[in-house]
Amino acid sequence: MNRTTQLRRYTLNPEHAAAFFTWWQDKILPVRREYGFTIEFAYFEREGMDFVWAVSLEGDTEKFMQVEHDYTRSKGRMLALDGVPPWTTNQHIALVDPIGFPGRADDDDN
């Protein structure tokens, strides 16, 4: 079965960055996982305050969008967002396609 991946890029508000990571790990990730999402990776680039992570779900785009819709409106997510400061100054979120890397152990096609 195929997997749909969403790339999420945030520019973090510098005054809240440290607290953001604790909140993200303790509050957001458990709810994401509850809805069946896999966190593929997460990286932080300090100089630009850029946080980039990918979340995926087994299934096609339609299934991903339905589960994302349910997750976005879930009680767990609403509770996680209750009273949080403005963590980000910019966000870019999009579905992405794998292209493969020659020589990688997990690359099936190249």
Image (cartoon, grey):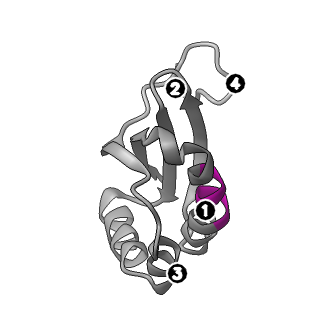
Q: Residue furthest bottom?
A: 75
Q: On the image, numbered disc 2 is attached to which residue?
A: 109
Q: In the image, residue 100 lies at what x, y percent?
A: 49, 24
**Magenta-colored span:** 21-26
Rendered view: 76 above or below 99:
below
SS at mark 4 in the image = loop
Q: CA distance from mark 1 to mark 2?
A: 31 Å
Badge 1 or badge 2: first in the primary sequence: 1
Q: CA distance from mark 1 to mark 3?
A: 11 Å
Q: In the image, residue 38 lies at what x, y percent?
A: 59, 56
Q: On the image, numbered disc 3 is attached to which residue?
A: 76
Q: Residue at x 48, y 31 (%)?
A: 49
Closer mark to the observer between disc 4 and disc 1:
1
The 10 Å Cα crowd at callout 4, few under 14, some 14 to 19, many 20 or more, is few
Q: Are marks 1 and 3 in contact (CB under 8 Å)?
A: no
| Residue 24 falls within the magenta-colored stretch | yes
Identified by mark 1, the residue type is: Leu
Q: On the image, numbered disc 4 is attached to which residue?
A: 105
Q: In the image, residue 2 lies at what x, y percent?
A: 46, 52
Q: Are marks 3 and 2 in contact (CB under 8 Å)?
A: no
Q: CA distance from mark 2 to mark 4?
A: 11 Å
Identified by mark 2, the residue type is: Asp
Q: Nearer the viewer, residue 63 or 2?
A: 63
| Residue 22 falls within the magenta-colored stretch | yes
